Amino acid sequence: RIAALRGLFARYNLKIFSIQTAGAGAFQKDPSARDAWVKRFARYARFAHKAGCECIGYWPGGDLGGQTVDEAIDSLVASLKEAAKIVANEELLLSVEIEPPFAFNTIDHLLRIVDGVDHPLVKGQYDPSHFDLFNGGKGKPEELLEKFGVQRLGYIHFTDTDGTLFNGTSKHLPCGDGHIDVRKSFEILWKGGYEGWIMIDAWMTKDPYDACRKGRQAIEAAQREFFARAE
């Protein structure tokens, strides 16, 4: 079945670069809940490796289970240290994505998670729509990207936004249709030597094909400018 899946994508010259996982069990106080999450994550990681992925995402939404945020971060770090061993064995990069409606919803939370795990294969995810709201919705997510540091990035969900919430999370818009300067983010990534994956995040956009087209055009325009400047 995995061979059939890989064959289907190969016929279109495509690659599954990552799968997304979730689960509040990773940050519960109860060790048995965390152990169960680690075992489940191991199965997802094994599938991701066999499917040809280079990355695996983790999305820590859910209830804190009576803990404080600080306690839950400590619990999550403990689980992700175990996940780090798994992704090392499966030759994957683990990227953690937090969002404004989550219990973990600030750039400092993400820094504490990534730095707490302190493993080269456990990184954080940059999504300008989320970083914009972490930064007050003023259209300058690149300010927090600089604070977070390109070296801490796993992979990227790229989108424009208007600084509002929509359907439970940050509103996603095609590049150029929102209020951020997408080029500034690309310049920080360029200067920081980022060479990882950029996924155009078309979540809940009116026309996902339009969002993907505009996102690719924005990336290619930035590449042309930066390469020309480097020559």
Image (spheres, rainbow, N blue to C red):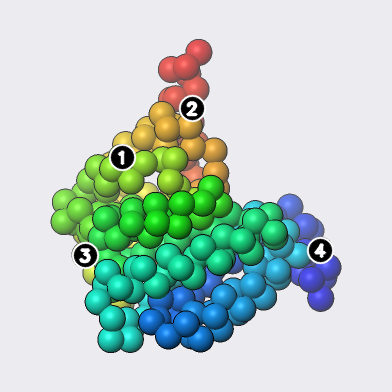
Report how far apart the C-alphas of labels 4 and 1 lie in the structure. Answer: 39 Å
* Camera-nearest label, 2 or 4: 4
Tell which circle, 3 or 4, labels the residue nearer the N-terminal end: 4
- Which mark's residue is nearer the viewer, 2 or 1? 1
Q: Earlier in the sequence, mark 2 or mark 4?
A: 4
Could you say which disc has been placed on residue 7 in the image?
A: 4
User: Gap between marks 3 and 1, in whole Å?
Assistant: 22 Å
Residue at the disc numbered 1 = 146
| CB under 8 Å between discs 2 and 4 | no
Query: What's the residue type where badge 3 is placed?
Result: Thr
Q: In the image, is residue 41 above or below residue 138?
A: below
In the rendered structure, find residue 164 and report the number of the disc placed on it.
3
Mark found first going from the N terminus, 3 or 2:
3
| Amino acid marked by disc 4 | Gly
**For mark 2, what is the residue?**
224
Mark 2: few/some/many CA within 10 Å (<14, 14-19, 20+): few
Q: Looking at numbered disc 2 in the image, what kind of residue is underneath it?
A: Arg
In the image shown, does 141 or 41 lie closer to the viewer? 41
Pick whichever of labels 4 and 1 is earlier in the sequence.
Answer: 4
Tell me the element at label 3.
loop
Which one is closest to the eye, mark 3 or mark 2? 3
Amino acid marked by disc 1? Glu
**Snapshot quadrant of residue 112:** bottom left
Q: CA distance from mark 2 to mark 1?
A: 22 Å
The residue drawn where x is 42% and y is 37% is: 189
